[in-house]
Image (cartoon, helix red, strand yellow):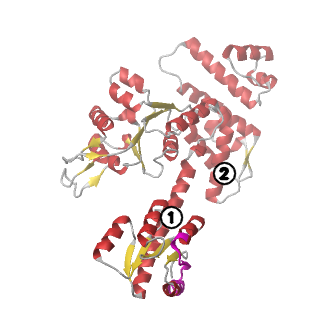
Amino acid sequence: MPTEQARLLIIDDERNYLLVLEALLRDAGYSVTALNDPETALAFLEESEIDVVITDMKMPKLSGREVLERIRRDYPQIPVLIMTAFGSIESAVDLMKLGAFDYITKPFANDELVLSVQNAANVAAMHRRYRLLHANLEERYGLRQIIGKSRGIQDVLTLVDRAAPIRSNVLISGETGTGKELVARAIHFASPRKDGPFISVNLMAFNTGVLESELFGHEKGSFTGAVAMRRGRFELADGGTLFLDEIGELSHDMQVKLLRILQERKFERVGGTEEIEVDIRVVAATNKDLQQEVERGAFREDLYYRLNVVHILLPPLRERREDIPMLLSHFMNVTARENNIPRKAISPEAMGYLVGYEWPGNVRQLENVAERCMVMVAGDVIGVSDLPPEVKDEESQLKNALDFLPIELNLADTLERLEAALIRRALVRAEFIQARAADLLGISKSLLQYKLRKYGIIGH
């Protein structure tokens, strides 16, 4: 019995064959629509969900070959079985080249036909599962997953929207945990390449020798342990997007090889001599300032400009604090759904601490805290006492803030940066009520207003 009851469309101008096929395939457990006019059948396809088409070859108005060509053009995911009473090896080969799933000669054996239909239905089911998986991936990694209303995130969304339709290389930079791979996937799924593969590789995960094989593949016997030919990430990404994370860690030798591929779109596998041409779009990411790496000679300037056609800079979470409540809500909803648990609320006091925290691990750390509170807090409301120590402890917060300071610093500038950060945090915790923020800081309201003007902080 077929699973998920595949939906069949049978096209044959001979009504007796239609009746026989319909009865046979209904008994086999399929949902069957039988039509004796090919033009009517093609119009029916426009309005209906069909998994497999079975069509006669010789019919008035349209031949089975023409029906096949139309379906392959308009509905390439639907397997088509061709039946004919005038079979020949040449015509069978010709139809298979056009994309027919199978070629069946009349009169046919019932078991043979049912088996062929079952195979086609299995292929159709795999296509359905693939489309569903792809739709889920697009939903999970699409533009809507880049959450925030801050100016910095809106600028990122604008750049992603502009970069997605073109094939130019993209360089994404930002601190660890800011969501660089999420942006890379959003670019891919918003691009014409979205039906192609998205291949990701973290360049820090491999030493130089292993990395070359990972990226370019290798031929059998090219080195000890190479017992079979293996395709590399560049080859696997053909027709899609290759995401190179931590590009700033690439060795000089590998930088040279990557530059050649970006210029020529060709490479050889390790131990091979045949040039392999690929159609890929490269998106690279780094938490380093590659311009500084170029200036100190650690990164090739020509490679930098090849990669940096479109540059997207992701702001750290501490510079987009207004997005924290939205991100928390999203992560808590995801955790509730995935663990089948009720959604919890966050007290205003706890939200004040969460928004005021420096978040050295950025969005990734925020996601971890949201999941931990959702899973571990017993009550319905997450309070200050439920937050991790690093979030609610003032000394830990000060240490985290100091960790962001450069080794070489100007004392006056640094003190002003710290003062501005403390004022912003106090405003958030005081729900932007200036008198309350001044009390938290231990200063007068007039002095606070002077500081707001001095640092250009919006105090509403």
Q: Which residues are magenta?
A: 22-39
> Looking at the picture, which amino acid does disc 1 mark?
Arg
Residue 84 in view, yes or no = yes
Residue 83 sits in quarter = bottom left
Q: Which residue is drawn at the image coordinates 57% and 30% (left, top)? A: 400
From this viewpoint, is residue 6 visible?
Answer: no
Which residue corresponds to mark 1? Answer: 129
The furthest residue to the front: 61
Dots 2, 1 in contact, CB < 8 A: no
Separation (CA) of disc 2 from disc 1: 26 Å
Front position in the image: 396 or 228: 228
Image height of 173 relative to 444, above or below: below
Q: Quadrant of the C terminus?
A: top right
Which callout, 2 or 1, points at the residue further toward the start of the chain? 1
Q: Secondary structure at mark 1?
A: helix
Residue 125: horizontal and vertical position, in percent? 49, 69
Residue nearest the observer in this picture, 451 or 88:
88
Q: Which mark is residue 303?
A: none
Q: Amino acid at mark 2?
A: Asn
How many numbered discs, if any?
2
Q: Which residue position holds label 2?
A: 333
Task: Name which residue lies at 51% across and 47% down.
Answer: 189
Mark 1: give few (<14), some (14-19) or many (20+) Cα within 10 Å. few
For residue 12, side relative to residue 413 (left or right): left
Q: Position of residue 53 (x, y in %)?
A: 48, 73
Q: Is residue 269 magenta?
A: no
Q: Nearer the viewer, residue 68 or 219?
A: 68
Position in image of residue 96 (x %, y %): 35, 69
**Is 114 placed above or below 46 here?**
below
Of badges 2 and 1, the one in the foreground is: 1
Q: Is residue 132 left or right of residue 82?
A: right
Please determine whether, in this image, residue 275 is positioned above or below residue 114.
above
